[in-house]
Image (cartoon, rainbow, N blue to C red):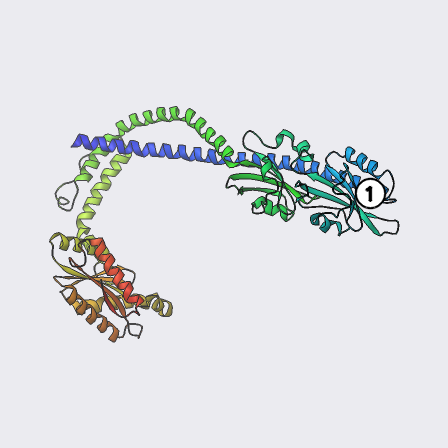
Amino acid sequence: MVHRGDFKLRNLVNAIVLISVLTTLGASILISYYNEKKSLTRTTFELNKAYADKIADTVDGLFSNLKQGLAVTGEYLQKDLKRPDMFEQLELFRLNHTSLNTISLIDRSGIITNTSPYNSDVIGKKIMPDVEKLFIQQRPIISEPFYTNANYLSVAIIQPLFNEYGEFIGALGGTIRLHETNMFNVVLGDKLKGEDGSYFFVVSSGGNLIYHPDPARIGDQVGENPAVRELLQGRSGMRRLINTKGVDMLASYTYMKESRWGIVAQTPMKVVLADSHHLVRQVLLYVIPIVLAFMFVIYMLIRKMSEPLLRLANYAAKLSTNNLEQEDPPRIHSWMYEANKLHKAFSLAVTHLRTEFDDLSHISQTDPLTGVYNRRTMELFMQNLISQQNPFAILVLDIDHFKKVNDTYGHVIGDKVLQFLAESLQNSLGKSGAIFRYGGEEFVILLPNTSLKTAMRRAETARKSMAEARGPSGKHITVSIGVASFPDTTKDVDELIAYADKALYRAKSRGRNRVESA
């Protein structure tokens, strides 16, 4: 037995040291992991933001050049919209601005009068409604994505034309087909999608995809994306988000003032987590051998230190209420200051326990406020009754509106109400039952050798007695009571209390100041 105790104590101390070491190691790894993840997240945000800003500046520059080119060309052409070389002028402008797929001349009534490249199918016809909405505004503007008659998803750049008297006479309109090679291919190039899953996409001022790594998604509405919502309000920034496909992303986004579009550069969060996990693995690879060597040294020291402590532990293991008066602490001869002090403490503790045991036993069984038994003692009573298969009834009582008593009269009166209830119940029951404070304003009464029917009758008597008496607050005190019995209701202790509790709450829900049976 001594050897088994020695082994257990030694392993306990080793376990404490091991837990301490592992806790410190774990905390260090977690801190390293958190800092690394935070650093990688910040770096990813900053890199994506730098790319987004750079591309946004380039695209804004391209649009600025396109709008400026349209403005200069329009200023030249608006002097004579019927000039014979109009097609050549439009063709020259389109060839010098390869980002545009087509350029059209529109008269003041919205009729297309010329195009480059030449398209007889549209010349003489009215512009599409999506373009007309912008046309009638008579100001330079970029459209939302729309489908042309040829079913091309496109955006239009409108430049109004005015005569020498400032009268509106038409417009130049350039279009970019989003599914074809255009300025975004030139600007983004092979940066559109990275090997780690990072990618860029461009949205219009209405939240539609203008450019995306997956061409099939161009034109989709993605206004629910948190970053896109920010862009639609003209804001740039960085945030972690769940995109419209349910992927956790680190997104940086930049608003393009010239076009009122936005570009989003984002990287999957799993990339950052994978890098952070790699750091943890590297730390473990180097630290674990050091920890093992440290633990071996600690184990050898513990073997030297454990002997006097084990003797005290064996003595402590034998202590009980039965032999407290019989055995004195063992003699300890140790070079350890702590072991000697611990031996003295044991001797003083045993002496104190011997003199205070009876008082402590009483205190542990009763509620200090009301003087009735406490919940722990109730459990012992019930276990004893059930183990002997003695039938009994359980009454769970709760003071109605007790919180209002505390709120109205204060906790001092509230305590007196609890004491008054406990005293009244004791006077009512005498020695036929045991009363316990279950918690707060809730009390439990155990009635040995009592049927459910009899218990209901006694519960009703107790309820009426309380309702007729005036409490310390000067008001009548009412109680709600739930009743159950063993073994009629159930043979399980926890279920028995639960059934009585349910009956109590049923009594409360039905108006309070009543008794309900399980």
Relative horizontal placement of residue 249, taking residue 368 as reference (left or right) = right
Please give the count of numbered marks on the rendered protein: 1
Of residue 129 and residue 464, the one placed in the foreground of this image is: 129
Does 295 appear above or below 84? above
Q: Which residue is mark 1?
A: 74
Of residue 63 and residue 413, the one placed in the foreground of this image is: 63
Q: Quadrant of residue 176?
A: top right
Give the x, y percent position of residue 296. 32, 25
Which quadrant is home to the C terminus?
A: bottom left
Residue, x 86% and y 49% (percent of image)?
Answer: 163
The kind of secondary structure element at disc 1 is helix
Give the x, y percent position of residue 25. 40, 32
Of residue 466 and residue 336, the one placed in the foreground of this image is: 466
Does 372 appear above or below 267? below
Which quadrant is home to the N terminus?
A: top left
Q: Quadrant of residue 174?
A: top right
Residue, x 22% and y 55% (percent of image)?
Answer: 495
Does 196 appear above or below 257? above
Give the x, y percent position of residue 302. 28, 29
Question: From where the camera sits, is residue 333 visible?
Answer: no
Q: Quadrant of residue 188?
A: top right
Give the x, y percent position of residue 471. 28, 72
Which residue ends up furthest to the front in the rendered image? 121
Callout 1 amino acid: Gly
Mark 1 Cα-neighbour bin, 10 Å: few <14, some 14–19, many ≥20: many
Question: From where the camera sits, is residue 452 visible?
Answer: yes
Residue, x 21% and y 31% (percent of image)?
Answer: 6
